[in-house]
């Protein structure tokens, strides 16, 4: 992604065993305003999805016109070392310190935005921090895969990650990074009919889907994704929440997402037709617009309580 302007940085995050040097990337806004703005232009703090790293959020961050963005590599992925223990609790404690340091860096609280697995982490952290300005959940995991209809596929996937964990490290890494399996995952998630975009998505997954630190950390992160969902904390997400989803999501059925939206006390939504679980690739520009519109409206007293559907072709 050489065309994307970003600056690498690090944050020293206190953890139970000392300090975790967290790699992160700062993305400047693409438009510099010459007049005073009516919005706060809060920065956006992104939390990427399972197996990915900061590259997954880069297209959205690149398409933000007036908001700065910070995208870290989560612990155990990309260039950030793993946490001493990989659990939902350890992830939320990590985000707690990351959020505080991000606020200190920008001088104002950011809007927190999580994608897929990142939506679980962001939602569970936000549930304990209800005074944050706003929360964005992209392709949120609204139902635990163990409770979904595809239980056989879920069981096979569990066996795959646990086998990768239990094998000798070099064999486990080879299994978990297998080219054909990564391609199968990518093909399952990609829904676009654009051959160029499909090729780009597959290239991104082959390049960055296997940057996990070790099989044990990956398996533990997978277990978190299997046992938690955003729906568990929906009643406690009292801050303004923007849900962004794809009508053709094969990972999380849109019916489950719609039910989740209805349970949120202060929600608005963007549901893109013709898009699946990869809004950050298949609708990156439209997703960036939705996030910026949401961030710019946080000072308004009225928030949309019903999902607003946007057709893929009219983004």
Image (spheres, rainbow, N blue to C red):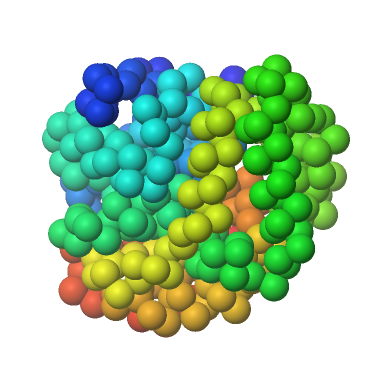
Residue 274: horizontal and vertical position, in percent?
Answer: 71, 65
Residue 151 % position (x, y): 71, 66
x 73%, y 42%: residue:
160
**Quarter of the image where one finds residue 269:** bottom left
Residue in the image at 63% along x and 56% along y:
277
Q: At which x and y percent is residue 141?
A: 52, 61
Task: Classify 22 as above or below 276.
Answer: above
Q: Is residue 157 visible?
A: yes
Q: Nearer the viewer, residue 206 or 41?
A: 206
Residue 101 percent across, percent down from the top left: 20, 31
In this picture, residue 18 sits left or right of residue 156:
left
Number of labels in the image equals 0
* 176 left or right, relative to 4: right
Q: Is residue 190 visible?
A: no
Q: Quadrant of residue 293?
A: bottom left
Q: In the image, is residue 254 above or below residue 85? A: below
Which residue is painted at 36% across and 37% down in the image?
69
Q: Which residue is nearer to you in this view: 79 or 274?
A: 79
Q: Quadrant of the C terminus?
A: bottom right
Where is the N terminus found, in terms of image quarters?
A: top right
Picture residue at 40% right of the left edge, 21% below the top: 23
Foreground residue among 293 and 181: 181
Q: Is residue 141 left or right of residue 265?
A: right
């Amino acid at each position: 992604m050489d065309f994307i302007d970003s600056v690498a940085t690090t944050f020293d995050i206190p953890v139970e065993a000392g300090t975790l040097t967290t790699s992160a990337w700062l993305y400047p806004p693409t438009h510099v305003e010459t007049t005073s703005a009516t919005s706060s232009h809060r920065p956006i703090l992104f939390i990427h999805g399972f197996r990915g790293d900061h590259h997954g959020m880069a297209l959205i961050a690149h398409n933000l016109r007036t908001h700065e963005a910070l995208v870290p590599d989560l612990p155990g992925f990309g260039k950030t070392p793993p946490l001493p223990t990989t659990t939902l609790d350890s992830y939320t404690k990590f985000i707690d310190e990351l959020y505080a340091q991000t606020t200190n860096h920008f001088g104002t609280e950011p809007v927190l935005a999580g994608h897929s697995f990142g939506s679980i982490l962001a939602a569970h952290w936000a549930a304990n921090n209800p005074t944050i300005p706003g929360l964005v959940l992209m392709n949120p995991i609204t139902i635990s895969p163990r409770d979904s209809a595809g239980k056989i596929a879920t069981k096979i996937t569990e066996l795959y990650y646990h086998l990768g964990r239990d094998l000798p490290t070099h064999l486990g890494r080879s299994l978990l990074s297998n080219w054909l399996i990564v391609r199968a995952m990518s093909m399952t998630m990609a829904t676009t009919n654009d051959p160029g975009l499909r090729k780009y998505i597959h290239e991104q997954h082959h390049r960055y889907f296997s940057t996990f630190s070790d099989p044990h950390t990956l398996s533990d992160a997978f277990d978190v994704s299997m046992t938690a969902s955003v729906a568990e904390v929906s009643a406690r997400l009292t801050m303004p929440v923007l849900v962004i989803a794809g009508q053709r999501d094969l990972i999380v059925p849109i019916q489950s997402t719609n039910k989740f939206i209805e349970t949120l006390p202060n929600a608005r939504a963007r549901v893109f037709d013709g898009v699946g679980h990869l809004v950050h690739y298949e609708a990156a520009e439209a997703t960036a617009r939705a996030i910026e519109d949401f961030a710019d409206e946080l000072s308004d007293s009225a928030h949309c309580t019903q999902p607003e559907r946007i057709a893929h072709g009219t983004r």
